[in-house]
Image (tube, grey):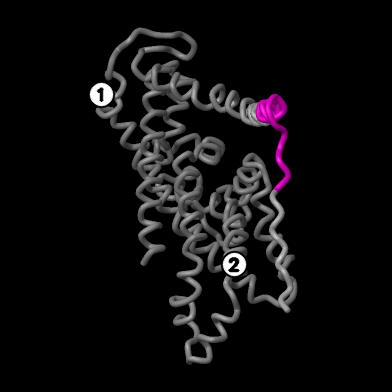
Amino acid sequence: MTTPVPLRSSPPPGPAGPGRAAHARQRALTAAALVVPFAALYVLFLLYPTLRVLQLSFTDADLTGAGRWTGTHNYARLLSEPTFWTALWNTVLFIVLTAVPNTLIGLGLAMLVLRLRRLKNVVLAAFFLPYVLPVSVVTNVWNWVLDSNFGLFNFVTGSTVTWFQDPVWALPSVAFVTIWWTVGFNILLFIAGLSNISPEIYEAAALDGASGWRLFRSITWPNLWPVTSLILLLQLIAQFKIFDQIYLLTQGGPFDKTLVLLLYAYREGFQQQHGGYASALGVVLMLAIGLVSAVQLALSQRGGRS
């Protein structure tokens, strides 16, 4: 004798008629209450300033005025200005000196930290501690360490290099300080990515005779590629917007050897009162960040598929 299967009970019907309409209206009001504040802040602090900067870039406005419409004059001047190309070259060079080295150093240190059996948390905290310091503290520390007269580094090594005033060493010195300051965040991301790789994959590969570089190339690197891609993208965007360290350590000198795009826009806008020209610089910087981010994202997706 077979046991009869009970029929699945249907869900209780919701409120009908005016009650259902009131329930839908309440849900719509709740959704609007959650979305409208965020949308208003987005329009007020991001969309409106962006459109305003775009409009000002076609005028000869000073820092506060509306200015006269000048068409593409600011962009033509920008392309013919040697200082703009110097700032663009310095920005690209700074990215080369920081983005990839910062990513590789973060990966290497994360793998070393995971191998530790004792004091792992202490070592990780030591690497991450600089990241929580404000930029003013970081620059003061390294101004003292690398000072040419009484700095600790020159005292220990006997060097006479004026690190932040030397035309050759100023930009690499700022890049070094930036890596020291931010690498802790990359280490944390890499540790999270490495921890998500199953140990069983390594054990199976080890049974097949794989070890060392072979394990890294065939297992670690492919599984870690999404995290690496994210870190590279964050590094590119952050270094394109480099300003604080340059302003506090070198002021763009010596001889504009550390002048970057954002500092150049600051000089033109807030010191020379060329608001329209500074806005054109801001638009170019925004387009450059968007273009480089799109290219990097496309390359990352291609690397992930391969």
Magenta-drawn stretch contains 25:
yes
Q: Position of residue 303 (x, y in %)?
A: 38, 62
Q: Residue at x 62, y 69 (%)?
A: 195
Q: Which mark is residue 157?
A: none
Q: Which residue is mark 2?
A: 110
Q: Are marks 1 and 2 in contact (CB under 8 Å)?
A: no
Q: Position of residue 283 (x, y in %)?
A: 39, 28
Q: Nearer the viewer, residue 135 or 23?
A: 23
Answer left or right for 38 relative to 220: right
Q: Nearer the viewer, residue 200 or 27?
A: 27
Q: Which mark is residue 76?
A: 1
Q: Give the SS element for disc 2.
A: helix
Answer left or right for 43 relative to 78: right
Q: Is residue 285 above or below residue 233?
A: above
Q: Residue at x 25, y 28 (%)?
A: 80
Crowd band around label 2 with a 10 angstrom C-alpha radius: few (<14), some (14–19), many (20+): many
Crowd band around label 1 with a 10 angstrom C-alpha radius: few (<14), some (14–19), many (20+): few
Answer left or right for 14 relative to 258: right
Q: Position of residue 57 (x, y in %)?
A: 37, 20
| Range drawn in magenta | 11-26
Q: Give the SS element for disc 1.
A: helix
Q: What's under tag 2, amino acid-wise?
A: Ala
Residue 162 in sight:
no
Question: In which quadrant will I find the C terminus?
Answer: bottom left
Question: In which quadrant will I find the N terminus?
Answer: bottom right
How far apart, in angstroms, are the residues tagged by discs 1 and 2?
A: 47 Å
Residue 100 in sight:
yes
Q: What's under tag 1, amino acid-wise?
A: Ala
Q: Residue at x 48, y 43 (%)?
A: 165
Magenta-drawn stretch contains 284:
no
Q: Position of residue 296 (x, y in %)?
A: 38, 51
Q: Nearer the viewer, residue 235 or 47?
A: 47
